[in-house]
Image (cartoon, helix red, strand yellow):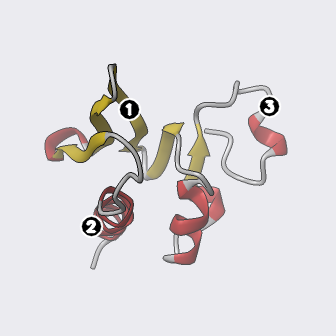
Amino acid sequence: MDTLEFYRENIYKILKHHADIPYSYGEIESEIVINQDRNHYILMIYGWDKDLRIHGCVVDVIIKNGKIWIYRDGIEDGITDDLVAAGVPKDKIVLAFHHPNVRQYTGYAVA
């Protein structure tokens, strides 16, 4: 399996695992949105919690330039731990939600 396919498969597995966890409140659903042509993966939630409309992005990940760029990570323990556990090297994960000047201190790729 090539690197791109390895990344795609593991990102999907991780997002699917989190999407399958039911919310303990409200009528909230999770959905994975994938643009395979652009290697873009989003985990969305939507629904209602009483009178409050719920709609938002939990995770936003793109594979580009041979690395996994995480633009949003709203998973409790973070998607990075899951990626590393799946075998993705830390130097192939960019925490893009951090300013470029801060990334050097994260233990992950700068860009």
Residue tagged 3: 102
User: Dot 2 lies on which element?
Assistant: helix
Give the total of numbered labels. Answer: 3
The foreground one among 110 and 95 is: 95
Q: Is residue 58 above or below residue 86?
A: above
The foreground one among 14 and 92 is: 14
The foreground one among 69 and 65 is: 69
Q: Find the distance from the CA under tag 1 to the CA under tag 2.
A: 24 Å
Q: Is residue 78 above or below residue 35?
A: below
Q: Find the distance from the CA under tag 3 to the CA under tag 2.
A: 29 Å
Q: In percent of the image, x 34 and y 40: which residue is there?
A: 26
Label at residue 57: 1
**Lower sequence index among marks 1 and 2:** 2
Q: Find the distance from the CA under tag 3 to the CA under tag 1.
A: 23 Å
* Structural crowding at the residue carrying mark 1, measured as other residues with C-alpha within 10 Å and reported as few (<14), some (14–19) or many (≥20): some
* Structural crowding at the residue carrying mark 2, measured as other residues with C-alpha within 10 Å and reported as few (<14), some (14–19) or many (≥20): few
Amino acid type, callout 1 = Cys
Label at residue 5: 2
- Examine the image and state in which quarter residue 16 appears: bottom left
Q: In percent of the image, x 56 and y 76: which residue is there?
A: 85
- 103 horizontally vs 80: left or right: right
**Lower sequence index among marks 3 and 1:** 1
Pinpoint residue 75: horizontal percent, then vertical percent: 53, 49
CB within 8 Å, label 1 to label 2: no
Pinpoint residue 79: horizontal percent, then vertical percent: 53, 56
- Examine the image and state in which quarter residue 92 appears: bottom right
User: Dot 1 lies on which element?
Assistant: strand
User: Dot 3 lies on which element?
Assistant: loop
Q: Nearer the viewer, mark 1 or mark 2?
A: 1
Pinpoint residue 89: horizontal percent, then vertical percent: 59, 68
Q: Is residue 36 above or below residue 49?
A: below
